[in-house]
Amino acid sequence: MDTAVQPVEAFNWRQADAIVFTADADAQRAIDGIGRTEDVHFSPDNQRLALVGHLDNRLLVLGVCFTGDGATPAVHLHSPQEVVSDAFSYPHGVFWIDDETLIVANRQGDAPILRVPRASPITAVLQLEPLARLRSDGTEQLVHTPGSVSVAALDGGWLEVLLCNNYANQVSQHLLDARNGYAVLGGSRLLAAGLQIPDGVAHSRDQHWIAVSNHDEHCVFVYENTATLGPSSPPAAVLRGMNYPHGLRWTRDSRFLLVADAGLPLVHVYRCEAGGWQGECLPIERMRVLDEERFRRGQYNPQEGGPKGMDLAANDRVLVTTTQEQALAFFALAPVLGPRDQPGTDADRPASTASTLARHVQGQARTLSALAQRWRDERIRHEAAMAEAGGVLAQAQCLVDQQQQHIQRVATSRSWRLTAPYRWLGQSLRDLFRAHTG
């Protein structure tokens, strides 16, 4: 298949069905002032929307209200909160862990986790300290120029976090304990082979699939999320027919994958066929989400001008995009995906079939395997350090034994009054030994 970059005129597309949103005056002012954006994400309850202010080192969190039961709900934005933090360093990706907690991927930093309380008149501007941070880990440099992040909930309160480390050309996985302050339990490189600037990552809802935008290769890699997935694993499917893929989102049933193209005014729509995600695929549809004037104004190089971040809400009935020239835009998805089940139906809940459970277990097994490997590495380092210190500890033990024997001899003598310095010395040596061995 042709992998060369193509002009807009080379693609067939349909005009996306825009939803004209409304916003409170303060919310609209905040949107207008956000500057260059890179990512956008709805909270799990669809009541909050996080928008990245990349160049100004801030986030904008907006309240969201969907009304109407039809295929095209109305959208209203309210209660803006500007979020700033010393932990921000060109924030690029954002993902809600739960309805009040999000993680940020800093292009020139690490990945902090922050709690964003619900809006009130006194919390319009929030200066936050992170609850935890995913940092570079020793010589492995797992976290390096992270630009996109995806989080999947595992059993037992654990979280799997995937980070696209853009200029390290790899995706890292991190296991966190949400019940223990988001303590980092382990981490490793997950995907690397064939990646050239991975610029977007997304778990499917059932955790069966992982999609990664491959910027310089002009494609998206789709991996089956198995316990054996690793840095040398090839993708199960390669999605083509795009210029510079950026944001990625799965529909709730994993049948469709939407790809925002940063180099075109388009969102590409791919569909899983009967055999699953495999082989090379072309989009079934392309939606134009940006008018010509805005697109050309933002295209100061071939890699820019199009949509960056993207998310789905209201049970896949609404698409939101963010671009440099249009911070927020909403579109109806029913004309492309067909009618979607309404929230509250069985289709709105994750499937509980044996096959889905098996895939979930496989994904957790892979994560636990990485954790076990980390523990094995730590044990090897610990044993090496103990072996190196063994000679010193043996000498200390010998000295303590000698002094103890001498103290015993003196203590049984009649010169008890003279033994006080020896007793003090013996206790000091015992304390020293415990400090080295404890």
Image (cartoon, helix red, strand yellow):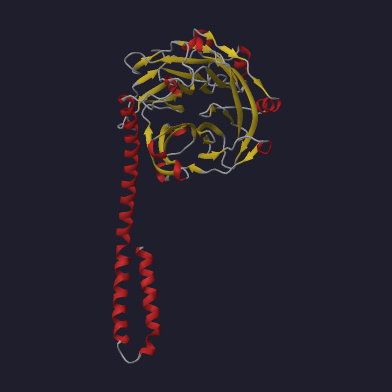
Toward the viewer: 196 or 346? 346
Residue 125 visible to the viewer: yes
Left or right: where 294 falls relative to 209: right
Residue 231 visible (yes or no): no
Residue lying furthest right: 25
> How many badges with numbers are in the image?
0
Q: Position of residue 112 (x, y in %)?
A: 52, 40
- Give percent across and percent down for residue 88: 57, 39
Quarter occupied by the C terminus? bottom left
**Quadrant where the image shows the N terminus:** top left
Rendered position, 146 above or below 9: below
Q: Residue at x 52, y 28 (%)?
A: 45
Task: Classify 209 as above or below 294.
Answer: below
Give the image location of residue 164, x and y in percent: 45, 31
The residue furthest bottom is: 414
Q: Nearer the viewer, residue 75 or 353?
A: 353
* Displayed quadrant of residue 406: bottom left
Q: Residue at 38% across / 71% down in the picture?
A: 431
Residue 322: x percent and y percent? 57, 22
Name the side, left or right, on which 432 lies relative to 123: left
Query: Is 151 drawn above or below residue 131 in the view shown?
Result: above
Q: Is residue 127 left or right of residue 111?
A: right
